[in-house]
Amino acid sequence: RTPLELHLEENYPHFAIYKEEIVNVFHRYKDRKREANAMDFDDLLVNWKLLLEEHEDISAVLKRKFRYILVDEYQDTNKLQADVVDAMGSVRSNVMVVGDDAQSIYSFRGASFENIITFPLRWPQATIYKLETNYRSTPQILQLANQTIAHNRFQFQKELHAVRGDGPDPAVVGVDDVFEQASFIAQRILELQMELSRRLIPYEIRSGVRFFEQAHIKDVIAYLKIITNYRDELSWKRVLKLYPKIGEKTAADMWGRISQDRDPLDAFLNVGPALSRSAPAGEPALRWGAIKKSLDSLRSVLRPLSTESMKRNPSECIRLVVEKGYADYARSKFANAQARLDDLEQLSQYALRYDDVNQFLEEVALANPLAGEDVAVVGPEDEKIVLSSVHQAKGLEWRAVFVIWLADGRFPSQRALRVPGGIVRVPEQNVPEEMALMLRDTMEKEIVIPGEEEERRLFYVAVTRAKQELYLVFPVMARDRAGMDVLMEPSRFIRELPGDVYEKWVIGTE
């Protein structure tokens, strides 16, 4: 529980000039959560840890409750999550984690590589099982991947073996500049019976907007949140603003009125004293009449939703919201209204498996994202390529993969190289064998993991997305921010590879 001010000074000194504003926002955010009787994901973890550390009676029950503790994707956990897992398993020593240290690439969003790499230090009795059979890639691609990750000091050493038969050697492709890079990729894809961009190649751009994060999904779910947590200010305001003549100011005024009551939903449905007042100062009577009509429309939705029978049927709740006004709103608001209404029908079907609204909302809050909203598609759906960041591509696979911009300063990025990848504190004795391999030839008791190692893991993730063909492309020239041509050096991740694991191609204009 590091004070926010200290955290900013140590990790984000470039935000120091905004320290007062950041601290103020943080405290206001905490106050608003308390007023809304709500917790975010971090609160769930922090309070779980506090229960384990500061309440011995509750801690003892929790630690005894679970016979086994299993954690998947352990390489993506943050320090708080690892602390909770360690504490929960401290009595029975019953922890099993599954993860790939070579795919730990999310430190930018809080994941701690130290969790998985120091697991044998914290659990010296643990047995390590290595899964080295790969069903995705050809032997040639895996040979390159094994060679690149071998340059990382901090890793559980392993070597992937292919089940698939041979394929072409990966190609390292040097091109004149970024335009030639784009031209090469488009031309190569043409040879693979596809086209790209201006050549009318179907394409898909994956963004970070997920199924449950889409506006229409969040709109409908906000209704359900209101009937389960009457003091959810954000949901009230979101729903109010869906109705004609109600904007930010009017929604805030409405919330200000009903929030004075112990039960805001009851006050709203039964037009309590706070709502029976006349129009706000400066509000024209005609406009206030339109607002009251909108409020009546909202009541006609919330009143049946709030019945006990509906609270036990989240699927019907969703359908009711759509049928009693949201479908009309969607058609007037969104160009792709029918696609969004289809999404809501899918959401209603998904909700059929839950017996009450609370249970459904809990699962939605924890659910993995299902699909993207901001997807740009050109051409037929059955033939397209995907443009993606490496982080977004993790867990996916394609027949052919082009990794672009493989120039030092771009991949790895200069900023990433300056950020340490974690700290390993070496015990005085009883160092597990796997850790001893990493710590050989050193007497240091505290070792800083270089940031370069996470960038190399990112490169490893990129190349292992390919099933059959892999192209590693770098431009020789590029323009800096001042518009000057700059000579680029191939990425160190290419330069460190032995020449027998790839073919070298040089592409240039004649």
Image: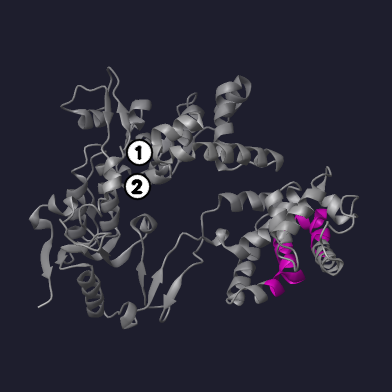
Please provide percent x and percent y for residue 464: 27, 56
Q: Secondary structure at mark 1?
A: helix
In contact (CB < 8 Å): disc 2 and disc 1? no
> Which of the 4 quarters of the picture holds residue 236?
bottom right
Q: Nearer the viewer, residue 463 or 31?
A: 31
Which residue bears the numbered disc 2? 105
**Residue at the (19%, 44%) spot, across then down:** 150
Q: In which quadrant will I find the C terminus?
A: bottom left
Horizontally, is 54 left or right of 392 in the view?
right
Query: Which kind of residue does numbered mark 1 sit on?
Result: Phe
Whether residue 285 is situated above or below residue 510 in the rendered picture: above
Which residue occupies the foreground of this view, 328 or 311?
328
Residue at the image point whose x is 45% and y is 39% from the top:
17
Q: Give above or below for 433 relative to 501.
A: above
Q: What is the crowding at mark 2: few (fewer than 14 residues within 10 Å), some, or many (at least 20)? A: many
Residue 241 falls in image quadrant: bottom right
Crowding at mark 1 (Cα within 10 Å: few <14, some 14-19, many 20+): many
Dominant secondary structure, magenta: helix
* Residue in view at x 57 percent, y 27 percent: 50
Task: Give the label on residue 321, or none.
Answer: none
Residue most extreme to the front: 282
Give how far across and how far down residue 260 sits, in percent: 82, 44
Residue on which disc 1 sits: 113
Q: Quadrant of residue 489?
A: bottom left
Which amino acid type is marked by label 2? Ile
Q: Find out whether residue 321 is within the magenta segment.
A: yes
Q: What range of the chain is rendered magenta?
A: 300-329
- The residue lying toward the viewer, choosing from 254 and 268, is 254
User: In the figure, 477 relative to 452: above or below?
Assistant: below
* Rendering coords of residue 272 (x, y %): 90, 51
- Apparent side of residue 200 relative to residue 473 in the rendered image (left or right): right
